[in-house]
Amino acid sequence: MKPNIDISDKNRGAVAELLNVLLADEYVLYTKTRNAHWNIEGNNFMELHKFFEGQYEAIDETIDSVAERVRSLGHYSLGSLKDFLEITHLSEDKELSDQKSALKALLESHETIICNCRKDLVTINDKYKDLGTADFITGIMEEHEKMAWMLRSYLA
Ligand SMILES: [Fe+2]
């Protein structure tokens, strides 16, 4: 049954499409963060191992919320790694055992997501008139801004 929530079919479809791209980005960043959790090396190994664990756990929750938001709009969320890799803005071909390059690679991915969220939430608010999703994406953007701050602080 179609949602009757005063957002046109066309606009709901367009918003769901943007959300699925965000879902793909979150999934790739989740995997990159686990990669760093597993493979990081150095004299503060345990500190970073746990730090990355906290971040991938937070991203895991975001993944679920984004997918369920797509469903709330009456569309299907993507659910295959192949689909995620086809549409993500992120690349995952980075070496993540060296501390500095791992932190930098993750920071860049968070910043890419932040910039895309900032652009998308304006489009979703102004063009597609979906204030709920614009607010939802604002919250996700803020979470990434906080995670990015923490990564940046290690690189100072
Ligand atoms: Fe672990």
Image: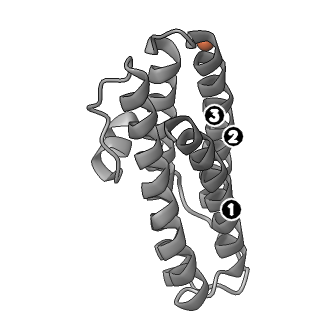
Q: Nearer the viewer, mark 1 or mark 2?
A: 2
Q: Which mark is residue 61?
A: 2
Q: Secondary structure at mark 3?
A: helix
Q: Position of residue 59 (x, y in %)?
A: 62, 40
Q: Residue at x 63, y 34 (%)?
A: 55
> Could you tell me if the residues under marks 1 and 3 are in contact, i.e. CB atoms within 8 Å?
no
Q: Is mark 1 within 8 Å of ligand 1?
A: no
Q: Is residue 59 above or below residue 19?
A: above
Instruction: Indicate which disc, 1 or 2, sits on the residue closer to the N terminus.
Output: 2
Q: Nearer the viewer, mark 2 or mark 3?
A: 3
User: Which residue is disc 1 drawn over?
Assistant: 72
Q: Position of residue 102 (x, y in %)?
A: 41, 29
> Could you tell me if the residues under marks 2 and 3 are in contact, i.e. CB atoms within 8 Å?
no
Q: Which mark is residue 55?
A: 3
Q: Residue at x 49, y 82 (%)?
A: 10
Q: Secondary structure at mark 1?
A: helix
Q: Is residue 93 above or below residue 66?
A: above
